[in-house]
Image (spheres, helix red, strand yellow):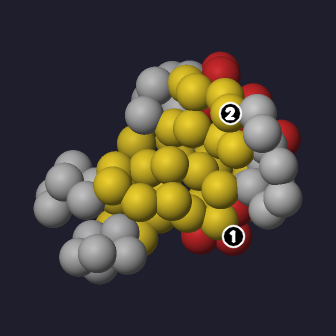
Amino acid sequence: MTTTTAGAMTTTLTGPVLFKAACPECRGCFELASDALRLAIGATRRTTFYSFTCPDCGSAVRKPAGERIVELLTGGGVRTLRVQGG
């Protein structure tokens, strides 16, 4: 079993890909499948982020995504939206 960690996200690379995440509202820690996450890639650090709904409290969570997080999420099959500048 291989585990990769970047910031608060951890990817396990055997079987289905699961990502460890935490909710800033309820402080819950949990694993999410790739279909529970969304990744938005923008032109700047401010417009590049991932989001999910906390399975514990239902809060919408949005966190910044640096290069390594983007690499892990896209490699794990997370749906990605490319944000165009206007």
Which quarter of the rendered picture does the N terminus lie within? top right
**Which residue is at 66% across, 28% downward?**
4
Helix, strand or loop status at disc 2: strand
Q: Looking at the image, do the residues carrying marks 1 and 2 touch, with CB atoms under 8 Å apart?
A: no
Query: In the image, what residue occupies the spot 68% across and 33% down?
Result: 3
Residue 82 in view here: no
Image disc number at residue 3: 2
In the displayed structure, 47 sits above or below 60; it is above
- Three-letter residue code for mark 2: Thr
Q: How many marks are shown on the rendered structure?
A: 2
Measure the alpha-carbon separation of dots 1 and 2: 19 Å
In percent of width and height, residue 74 lies at 79, 43
Looking at the image, residue 17 lies above or below residue 2: below
Judged from the image, the secondary structure of the residue bearing numbered disc 1 is: helix
Could you say where residue 33 lies in the image, as x and y percent from the top left? 65, 65
* The one of 5 and 85 positioned closer to us in this rendering: 5
Q: State the mark number for residue 18.
A: none
Q: Nearer the viewer, residue 50 or 33?
A: 33
Of the pair 27 and 50, the residue shown nearer to us: 27
Give how far across and how far down residue 22 sits, in percent. Answer: 34, 50
Who's the residue at 55% across and 63% down the image? Answer: 32
User: Would you name the residue on which mark 1 appears?
Assistant: 35
Q: The disc labelled 1 sits on which kind of residue?
A: Asp
Counting residues from the start of the chain, the first of labels 1 and 2 encountered is 2
Question: Front-most of 33 and 3?
Answer: 3
Q: Residue at x 66, y 41 (%)?
A: 11
